[in-house]
Image (tube, helix red, strand yellow):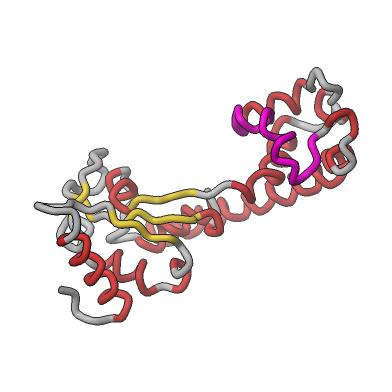
Amino acid sequence: MKTLLCALLALVATGAAAQGAAAGKAVYDSTCAVCHAAGIVGAPKPGDAAAWAPRVKGGLDALVRSAIKGTTTGMPPRGGRPDLSDAQLRAAIDRSVRHRVGFCADTCHLYAAGYDLVRDFEGVWRNWDATCGRAHLRCLHLNDSKTPLGSRRDRHELIGEGTLGAAPFRRIMREPRFANVIKILETPKGDDEFTQDRRMLRRLRAYARGRPAR
């Protein structure tokens, strides 16, 4: 029952995210793009990094505030569309910048934060897909954990030798969805900078090939 409920909640979240993206695109195409495509009243054009830099340095919330209130350079409040809600404006801005966003996930951090990669591996990544989007997972820090699930303590351990164990790392190394995601080791070094890292690399390669780990 619990598994079914989690699956249903994930589907609802995924559906809501898809609806938000569609609404954002509609607002952007009908309103934002009109000025930005032509650079009207100083609106930065798509792809002009220098022109966008002063606006994006404050983050997404700053962009949303400027869209709601308007700017001193000529953009009217809500882009001249008083009928648009704050949520619609946020969705439009999110749509315009989201492709530039990438995330790094750390297996130890996830586990310590309560995301159970051992017993609910699929659920964790289903939640990620609904919240952040799989395409935005650009890097994985591969670390086992010295502490238990939900400990809120970031204590890295050697791969397969901590509370996560080997199973999540086997899946990460074998499943096609993670094939193009950069993977970085941050495991304990021991007495020198190379011996343990080389051993962990051999272990991960063995997981990828389906061979017994050393």
Residue 31 x, y percent position in the rendering: 86, 39
Residue 6 x, y percent position in the rendering: 44, 56
- Image quadrant in which the N terminus is located: bottom left
Asked whether, in this view, residue 138 is left or right of residue 184, the answer is right
Residue 95 x, y percent position in the rendering: 70, 46
Asked whether, in this view, residue 191 is left or right of residue 21, the answer is left
Please determine whether, in this image, residue 83 is positioned above or below residue 91: above
Residue 99 x, y percent position in the rendering: 64, 51
| Tally of numbered tags | 0
- Image quadrant in which the C terminus is located: bottom left
Please determine whether, in this image, residue 134 is positioned above or below residue 67: below
Please state which of residues 49 and 119 is positioned toward the viewer in this rendering: 49
Residue 181 sits in quarter: bottom left
Q: What stretch is highlighted in magenta?
A: 44-60
Question: Does the magenta run of residues contain 146?
Answer: no
**Residue plotted at (38% across, 57% down):** 2
**Residue plotted at (25% across, 67% down):** 201
Please state which of residues 67 and 114 is positioned toward the viewer in this rendering: 67
Question: Does the magenta run of residues contain 52?
Answer: yes
**Residue plotted at (22% across, 70% down):** 203
For residue 1, say whether it is visible.
Answer: no
